[in-house]
Image (cartoon, helix red, strand yellow):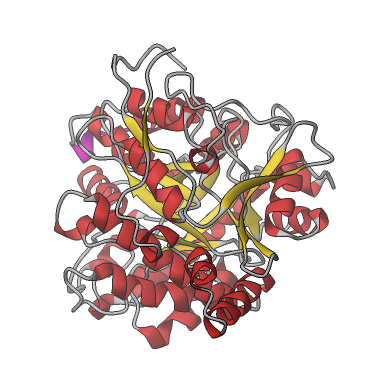
């Protein structure tokens, strides 16, 4: 742990087993000392069901937790030999690929081939050895991402711990400005990949003036975050100056924050986006650390009225070309889909995105399927999330009412994470994922045979199913 963060009393974190199950591990034969986590649910008839688990050591009653020191590094960290994509292309099954294969219950060769083909990514920065490798791709379990990071201090770690307990597979750190200390503490204690929007922090560095931004400021921000260990970064590099006129007739203009920043920069400078002109240099930096590039949809529609318009499709074509350039530099790439689409348009949009990006894994906020769900955006988003995941979107970013109505609240965050976890499971079931099917079969059996413990333990949110209103906290101090 670095000496940058100062608090004398470390905050409490949620640290208790998930009700109805136990934390167990599978020893990874090919990587000495590596253990793949899962949650075991013991059924009334003596059998058991093993469930994918992304909660890290915070649900292990035997884990020794120390927020000052952070989590111990995992064995077999891939370092200094290129990116996961480059190694996969060379026919190598890395320790991360072996770990992922064991978690997903698939052959390591499938993981290697999907990564080599650019159809899946393993976000695992060399400088984030505390994380447990996971994979994002349509051939695998649909993943969920929660957003943490508020203006108040000392909340990111707790929000991260709670989010992964509720089912989040990665966490997006939305903090900006003087966020180095908080992000470092988050990374050192995060067993899941951490993502950022580096353009937001770069903007804070120039006092919020888009016109004052420069490639150098953005580059330095990317390097700082990569050095800390950030695993994936969202970059709206597909927003070009020639695209902006296509948004003139929109009902809601440009609503994506990154897209709006770059649009303002291009208009005031009257020149091409520095994210586009310096894209190859950016790829060189990301490849050095194996940071996964998330090509953001800066011109995504801000309302159903603007869905599937010319601006969005023009940006998608540009992003498809950038994805090809990034992969040529060995950078793992995923692509953002639309944040708003009517239900009937989702499948066609996912197919087009897959075609334009040459099969890169897609992620999406929602999409929201209607604009009338004010205060219930997570419901509208979960409906769209299930549809887009069934169509092939690999990761769902949680959208909650708090992101529209004000400061995030943990109860609202839980509702959003659980809703999107349900959507992801529904999509896995529709896609024929065997673990999802087996879980449904066992829960159905438990319902028919009136085994209430089994039903609750197999549910998406056992804490709520068991009526647990609060879970254990450990207040950790320096040792």
Question: In the figure, is residue 89 to the left or right of 281?
Answer: right
Look at the image and say whether residue 2 sits in the magenta stretch: no
Residue 205, x across and y down, in percent = 26, 28
User: Which quarter of the figure is the C terminus placed in?
Assistant: top left
Asked whether residue 240 appears in the rendered view, the answer is: yes
Look at the image and say whether residue 213 sits in the magenta stretch: yes
Question: In the figure, is residue 334 to the left or right of 216?
Answer: right
Q: Residue furthest bottom?
A: 344
Q: Nearer the viewer, residue 426 or 206?
A: 426
Q: How many marks?
A: 0
- Residue 275 lies in what quarter of the image? top left
Q: Nearer the viewer, residue 391 or 476?
A: 476
Residue 95, x across and y down, in percent = 75, 39
289 w.r.t. 122: above or below: above
Q: At 24% across and 73% down in the image, what residue appears?
A: 303
Point out the stretch of residues depicted in magenta. Answer: 209-214
Q: At 40% across and 49% down in the image, what residue appears?
A: 163
Residue 4, x across and y down, in percent = 36, 14
290 w.r.t. 353: above or below: above
Residue 183, x across and y down, in percent = 38, 30
Asked whether residue 368 appears in the rendered view, the answer is: no
Q: Nearer the viewer, residue 30 or 136?
A: 30
- Residue 41 lies in what quarter of the image? bottom right
């Amino acid at each position: 742990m670095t000496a940058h963060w100062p608090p004398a009393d470390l905050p409490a974190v949620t640290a208790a087993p998930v009700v109805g199950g136990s934390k167990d591990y599978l020893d990874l034969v090919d990587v000495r000392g590596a253990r793949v986590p899962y949650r075991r649910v013991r059924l009334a008839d003596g059998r058991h069901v093993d469930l994918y688990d992304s909660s890290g050591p915070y649900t292990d009653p035997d884990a020794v937790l120390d927020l000052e020191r952070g989590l111990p590094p995992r064995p077999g960290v891939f370092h200094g030999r290129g990116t996961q994509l480059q190694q996969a292309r060379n026919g190598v099954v890395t320790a991360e690929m072996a770990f992922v294969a064991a978690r997903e219950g698939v052959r390591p060769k499938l993981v290697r081939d999907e990564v080599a083909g650019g159809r899946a990514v393993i976000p695992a920065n060399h400088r984030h050895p505390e994380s447990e490798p996971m994979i994002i791709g349509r051939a695998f379990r649909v993943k969920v991402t929660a957003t943490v990071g508020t203006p108040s201090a000392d909340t990111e770690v707790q929000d991260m711990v709670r989010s992964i307990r509720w089912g989040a597979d990665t966490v997006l750190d939305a903090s900006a400005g003087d966020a180095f200390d908080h992000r470092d503490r988050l990374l050192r204690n995060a067993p899941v990949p951490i993502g950022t929007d580096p353009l937001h922090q770069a903007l804070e560095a120039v006092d919020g003036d888009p016109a004052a931004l420069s490639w150098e400021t953005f580059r330095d921000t990317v390097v700082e975050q990569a050095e800390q260990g950030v695993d994936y970064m969202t970059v709206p590099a597909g927003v070009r100056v020639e695209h902006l006129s296509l948004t003139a007739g929109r009902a809601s203009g440009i609503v994506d924050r990154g897209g709006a920043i770059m649009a303002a920069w291009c208009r005031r400078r009257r020149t091409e986006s520095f994210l586009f002109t310096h894209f190859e240099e950016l790829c060189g930096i990301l490849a050095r650390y194996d940071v996964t590039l998330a090509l953001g949809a800066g011109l995504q529609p801000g309302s159903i009225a603007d869905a599937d318009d010319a601006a969005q499709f023009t940006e998608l074509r540009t992003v498809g070309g950038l994805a090809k350039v990034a992969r040529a530099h060995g950078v793992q790439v995923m692509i953002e889909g639309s944040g708003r689409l009517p239900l009937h348009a989702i499948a066609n949009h996912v197919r087009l995105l897959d075609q334009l990006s040459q099969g890169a894994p897609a992620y999406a906020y929602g999409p929201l399927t209607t604009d009338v769900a004010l205060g219930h955006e997570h419901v509208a988003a979960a409906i769209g999330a299930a549809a887009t995941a069934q169509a092939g979107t690999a990761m769902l970013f949680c959208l909650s009412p708090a992101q529209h109505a004000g400061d995030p609240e943990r109860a609202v965050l839980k509702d959003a994470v659980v809703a999107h976890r349900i959507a992801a499971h529904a999509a896995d079931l529709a896609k024929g994922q065997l673990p999802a099917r087996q879980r449904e079969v066992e829960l159905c059996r438990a319902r028919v045979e009136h085994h209430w413990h089994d039903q609750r333990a197999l549910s998406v949110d056992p804490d709520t199913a068991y009526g647990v209103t609060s879970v254990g906290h450990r207040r950790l101090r320096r040792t």
